Image (cartoon, coloured by chain):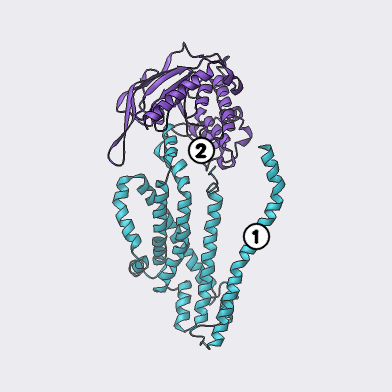
Amino acid sequence: MSLHENIEAGSPGGAVNARTLIALEDVSKTYATASGGGVHALDSVSLEIRDGEFVCVVGPSGCGKSTMLRLLAGLDSCEQGNLAMDGEPILGPSPRVGVVFQAANLLPWLNVRENVRLPLRVGGRHMSAEDRVDALLAMTGLGDFGQRYPYELSGGMQQRAGICRALARDPEVLLMDEPFGALDALTRERMNLELQRIWQANRKTILLITHSISEAIFLADRVIVMSARPGRILKELPVNIPRPRSFDEIISHPDYKPLAREIRTLLTGQETANG
Amino acid sequence: MVNVLVSTVATSPASTSTTSRRFNAQSLTPWIGLVILLSLWTGSVHAFAIPSYILPTPAAVLSALWSGIAVSPTNALGYYIPLWSTLSNAAIGFFIGVALGLVLGSLMAESRIVERLLMPYAFALQSLPKVAIAPLVVIWFGFGDGSKIAIAALLAFFPVLINSFTGLRAIEPERIDLMRSLSATRFETYRIVKLPNAAPFIFAGLDMAVVYALLGTIVAEFLGAQRGMGVVITQAQAVSDVAGVFAALAILGVCGIVLHGLVRWLERSVVHWADRNKH
């Protein structure tokens, strides 16, 4: 259960030859609304995510990105299509999946340590695992803040604690729903660097939802661009920029501008198409 | 972060002294109000020559108060025996009412069936003036401590029931999603997420319940009892000792303020995160 068991030199597209871990096949989802109608959130989405891959999903607001994440987390079910992890259908929440929520979603009545330990003491688990909690807090620079309460922490530190909590059960997959959307630009860049480091050290499979094009290119092996409602996958764009990436270097990389422009064109085309 | 800590430490002595000065000034204001009230009271009693069986002077009330306080605690004419009787019965009723309210409120919040089963009657009973039920309770439980405890419990029950139900339902869906993503059991979700989340609501209910329990006990004592502050009041009233009535009311008022303060103090130490978790 070491945190650093799989440290590898970060190579671009390090997961290219890995097995498929998560597969969505022709998935559609319609939410019932209070007025009796339905919101068509996802429309026949198919996607494969390889083991150890970092995938970012960008799309306009309400494009079903979050719906996709909820389906993968087992928090919702779809009426059409198949979702599978390792070939097994996803029927409900799994300990192999950790979820990082928007705005951290820490419990304000628990201190940082108790928040991070939460996954180890619910759902039929009664592990003390103090060492593991210590290691996670140290890895994210929260070593001295275990006894603090969430309201005593900055937004960036809160989200670091949220990431620690998602990693507590040592899941294979991290699902992150706009984790840094509420942070200021500088904190956000720092969190992106840290997330890249955590990912390279632990080699989780990560699906991260974001509004930010630069964040998506910086973090992803592959960027998925989605359309406005009903959500469809418009394009999958591989990012072949070597790792570890830094914000200074990535902007001057020859691939960066064409990629950013293409994503922007796809997204703005969506906005004008929808008036 | 280091800078933030240093600057907080550097400014804290100054800020503490200003807040304590402001605190002193603010805590003085109600006393000024009391002085003005007492002066007006004394002045009007003398100016309009109001007889003491209608409105006694503050000095007369004070002397009645003193004659009840400055006695041995075992003296049957002092306030200590009736006050102990009233407060202990109110406390027992309070705890019974709070426990029942919390358990039923939780069951109603957790189960739609229990909610549909109980909610209409809970609201019907809530809108009924419960003091009007008191004579019935006395018929059932007699003139002893039983009926006082029962009425105190009945009055304490409703604010806790309604507030715990409302608080347990007022949970952010993200928190439920978190617990579901961890495959937490229903009771774990209740204990770790819903109950702490409802704590500010529940304390608002306790704040009402503690005063209602005292009120319920006094009402039961009015209806016929051997002991208690309610009996002190009715006995003073029977001999037109209005100063004695005022003195007993003053004692009850102080009890109400102290109990309210206790609940608020408990709330601040338990619900330390409230209003501070918005970043």
Which residue is denoted by mark 1 in the rendering?
B22
Q: Is residue A73 left or right of residue B39?
A: left
Where residue A55 appears, x then y in whole percent?
47, 21
| Chain drawn cyan in the picture | B
Q: Secondary structure at mark 1?
A: helix
Q: Examine the image and state in which quarter residue A197 appears.
A: top right
Measure the alpha-carbon separation of dots 2 and 1: 35 Å
Where residue A4 appears, x then y in whole percent?
57, 20
Q: Examine the image and state in which quarter residue A142 appears.
A: top right
Which residue is denoted by mark 2 in the rendering?
A106
Residue located at (29% from left, 42% from top)? A35
Residue located at (43% from left, 22% from top)? A224
| Closer-to-camera residue (B126/A19) | A19
* Residue type, mark 1 in image: Arg
Q: Is residue A207 left or right of residue A228?
A: right
Q: Is residue B256 left or right of residue B225?
A: right
Pointer 2 and pointer 1: residues touching (CB < 8 Å)? no
Residue A188 in view: yes
* Residue type, mark 2 in image: Leu
Residue located at (48% from left, 45% from top)? B196
Residue located at (39% from left, 27% from top)? A270
Name the mark nearer the viewer: 2 or 1. 1
Where residue B170 appears, x then y in whole percent?
41, 46
